[in-house]
Image (tube, grey):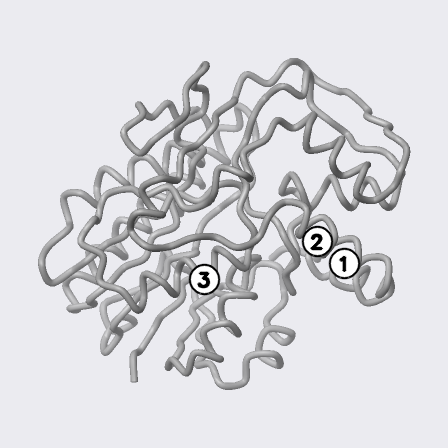
């Protein structure tokens, strides 16, 4: 049986990926510091998983012994503008700790390391569709750390240690550990709860999106296939490229709620459209469109309000 280690496995993606891989009959270990106090909830829903409570910055070689594949979801995600303390913390977790863990994994003869990078490394590309060869222009501390790890991965690749840097778009969709700071998730919640959507001016900024189910499927695809291409790969589909204004209008339409956009801030110049031709040529295709995610989130909220609100409370719970 294949032994898979998921770092940061109790978060937004990990809370869906873990049960997904359990059904595929893998031997799973999850290492997580449980920053949002969801340890008991996670353990109850993943009883077949070996769970270790530990900070990703404190891992040592023995944590990687007898592991075949690592999926590294451990990261600080939310970006704050011009916050030196946060920037340093992001660099410590998303760059320094990740690089250390990559080197430990190689030393311990791990076969595959699946690293979720981000399309945010493109930042702003005027009138250009970003292929994997587009120049990187990261500005946030999050995107800069992702970009630096991609560069380090190229140095660590070997015939016996395959590292796959997967550039994911902004993720959306329901998870047992919800994140409402993600664009589509937050917009749908605001639209249903407050009958309005808060939108950063002027809404023309474009983003690519991917459903969380497709993220899980992508990880599984790279688990079961030995892909020769080991450079950064965009994961997604062009149909989920859209401007934020178009996205907000689609949400109002799907939910049958009168258009009510609350504009705030100054114009956001971060805008990029992404090509996914390469991943399709490599054999993987996504299944879920933005429409599906809107309907899914609305159904979860409207039909199971009390349960959904409990998830919201857990998702925004007390931090350690």
- The answer to whether the residues at label 3 and label 1 have Cβ atoms under 8 Å apart is no
- Image height check: is 10 above or below 170? below
Where residue 201 appears, as percent x and y from the top left, is 69, 17
- The answer to whether the residues at label 2 and label 1 have Cβ atoms under 8 Å apart is yes
Which residue position is annotated with label 3? 217
Callout in the foreground (3, 1): 3
Marks 3 and 2, how far apart in space? 26 Å
Q: Nearer the viewer, residue 95 or 83?
A: 95
* Secondary element type, mark 2: loop
Where residue 141 appears, as percent x and y from the top left, is 44, 32
Where residue 314 appears, as percent x and y from the top left, is 71, 61
Q: Is residue 168 left or right of residue 268?
A: left
Residue 122, image quadrant: top left
* Secondary element type, mark 3: helix
Which residue sits at x=11%, y=63%? 160
Which residue sits at x=15%, y=68%? 109
Which residue position is annotated with label 2? 316
Q: Nearer the viewer, residue 161 or 319?
A: 161
Q: Is residue 102 left or right of residue 279?
A: left
Q: Is residue 223 left or right of residue 194?
A: left
Marks 2 and 1, how far apart in space? 5 Å
Which tag, 3 or 1, sits closer to the chain's start?
Answer: 3
- Image height check: is 218 above or below 45? above
Q: Residues within 10 Å of mark 1 (few under 14, many from 20)?
A: few
- The answer to whether the residues at label 3 and label 2 have Cβ atoms under 8 Å apart is no
Disc number for residue 313: 1
Which tag, 3 or 2, sits closer to the chain's start?
Answer: 3
């Amino acid at each position: 049986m294949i032994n898979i280690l998921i770092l940061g496995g109790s978060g937004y993606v990990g809370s869906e990926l873990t049960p997904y891989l359990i059904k595929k009959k893998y031997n799973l270990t999850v290492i997580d510091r449980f920053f949002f106090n969801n340890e008991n909830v996670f353990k109850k829903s993943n009883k077949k998983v070996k769970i270790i409570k530990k900070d990703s910055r404190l891992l040592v070689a023995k944590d990687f012994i007898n592991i075949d594949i690592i999926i590294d979801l451990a990261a600080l995600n939310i970006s704050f503008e011009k916050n030196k303390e946060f920037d340093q913390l992001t660099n410590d977790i998303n760059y320094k700790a990740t690089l250390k863990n990559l080197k430990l994994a190689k030393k311990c003869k791990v076969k595959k390391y699946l690293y979720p990078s981000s399309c945010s490394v493109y930042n702003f590309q005027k009138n250009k569709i970003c292929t994997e060869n587009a120049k990187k222009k990261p500005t946030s501390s999050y995107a800069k750390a992702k970009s630096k790890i991609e560069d380090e991965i190229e140095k660590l690749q070997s015939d016996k240690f395959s590292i796959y840097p997967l550039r994911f778009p902004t993720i959306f969709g329901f998870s047992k550990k919800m994140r409402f700071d993600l664009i589509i998730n937050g917009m749908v919640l605001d639209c249903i709860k407050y009958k309005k959507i808060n939108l950063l001016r002027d809404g023309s900024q474009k983003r690519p999106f991917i459903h969380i189910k497709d993220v899980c499927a992508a990880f599984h695809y790279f688990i079961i296939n030995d892909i020769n291409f080991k450079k950064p790969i965009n994961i997604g589909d062009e149909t989920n490229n859209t401007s934020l204004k178009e996205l907000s209008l689609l949400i109002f339409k799907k939910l049958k709620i009168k258009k009510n956009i609350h504009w705030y801030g100054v114009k956001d110049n971060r805008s990029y459209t992404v090509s996914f031709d390469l991943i399709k040529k490599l054999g993987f295709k996504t299944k879920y469109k933005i429409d599906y995610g809107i309907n899914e989130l609305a159904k979860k909220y409207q039909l199971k309000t009390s349960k959904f609100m409990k998830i919201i409370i857990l998702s925004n719970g007390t931090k350690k």
